[in-house]
Image (cartoon, rainbow, N blue to C red):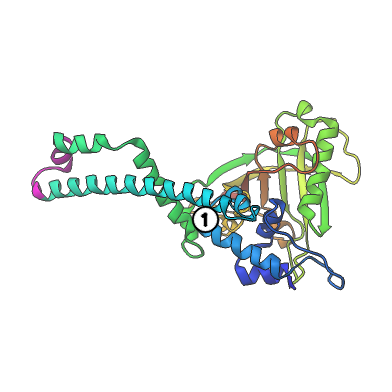
Amino acid sequence: MLTVVEVSRMYGVSARMLRHYEKQGLMRSDRREGYAYRVYGPEDILRLRQILTLRKLRLSLKEIGEILSDPGPAAAVRVLERNLAQLDEEFKALRAVRDVIAAFLEALKQRRALPAGEALLQDERLMALADALSPASTLIKEERRSIMEKLEQGQQGWQAMKDVRIVYLPASDVAAAHVVGDDPEERAGDMISDFVRVTRLWEKHPGLRLYGFNHPSPSDESGWHGYEFWITLPEGVEVPPPLEKKHFPGGTYAAHMIQMGNFQEWEWLDRWVRESDEYEYNGSGDPDDMFGALEEHLNYHDHVRRTQKGEPQTAQLDLLIPVKPKAK
């Protein structure tokens, strides 16, 4: 039997990602007698290896779920045929773009004395070739480049950070739910969501926002840690125990949106802040609260209204690191 931390180190998957796979119903963990925390057996490890292999093939978690839930080959054949057809279309589009680029390049080499704009844009044959390309061809090319950038990990991964925004989060009172132990995100999330539904908070506070952070972060081989959720409040709302009313002072943050589960991008955002020419870190300095960083669950307002029980599924998160302008 392997612990969460052992599996995380062996396969390069974060504990948060393992929990996400479990919440999606793709795999499971167990609690055995004599163990104080969740463990993974041989069948669970095999399932994880299957998931990781299929992810390398660019399959979505939904598609992976279709394949793994089918005892026969039918779902796998259907999904792979669909993806193969999509790849064939990409190859055709890329080949068309390549052919046009080659024609443009040859024209430039033959007309070295002319400015590029004159050599290319006044050539009706070349312009006809370019016009024949569909917008989809260009989009596929851009999408492919983006995918390849994001697949590069570690040293080069942070370079894919093209969408970092600097945002100001307004100060607000919040209802806080804090759980330490097994599955703290889910348990704290249930507490907040139940409170929001009982009070119909979205009617009193249409601009409600949900933040969360490790508290404390994992620190030993068990992988146990805490998680704290904050839901913003309007004036005059009472907060029943075990929730606690707190004040969030707000501030300026570097923000980067991820798909749920892509928590490795925290490292990329952290490096962006450290290498920024305009901003510098302005956090708490305390690892127990993620140094003041936050995870905002986007569109929580709609998600919680559509879910009758438990923490709603969140597709996208904003990773947020507190920053301040560098002194000039």
**Residue shown at 28%/45% (left/top)?**
96
**Residue shown at 81%/67% (left/top)?**
37
Residue 250 location, quadrant: top right
Residue at the outermost right position: 241
**Residue shown at 82%/47% (left/top)?**
177
In the rendered structure, which segment of residues is drawn in magenta?
Answer: 110-122
Is residue 82 within the magenta segment? no
Residue 265 location, quadrant: bottom right
Q: In the image, 112: left or right of 38?
A: left
| Residue 107 image position (x, y, % from top left) | 13, 46
94 over 218 or under it: above or below: above
Q: In the image, 81: left or right of 302?
A: left
Say if residue 156 shows up in the picture: yes
Residue at the outermost top position: 203
Q: Observer-nearest residue: 232 or 132?
A: 132
Q: Observer-nearest residue: 81 or 27?
A: 81
Residue 30 location, quadrant: bottom right
| Residue 145 image position (x, y, % from top left) | 40, 51
| Residue 130 image position (x, y, % from top left) | 24, 38
Q: In the image, 69: left or right of 30?
A: left
Say if residue 246 shows up in the picture: no
**Residue shown at 47%/60% (left/top)?**
152
100 over 56 or under it: above or below: above
Reading the image, the residue beneath label 1 is 272
Q: In the image, 30: left or right of 136?
A: right
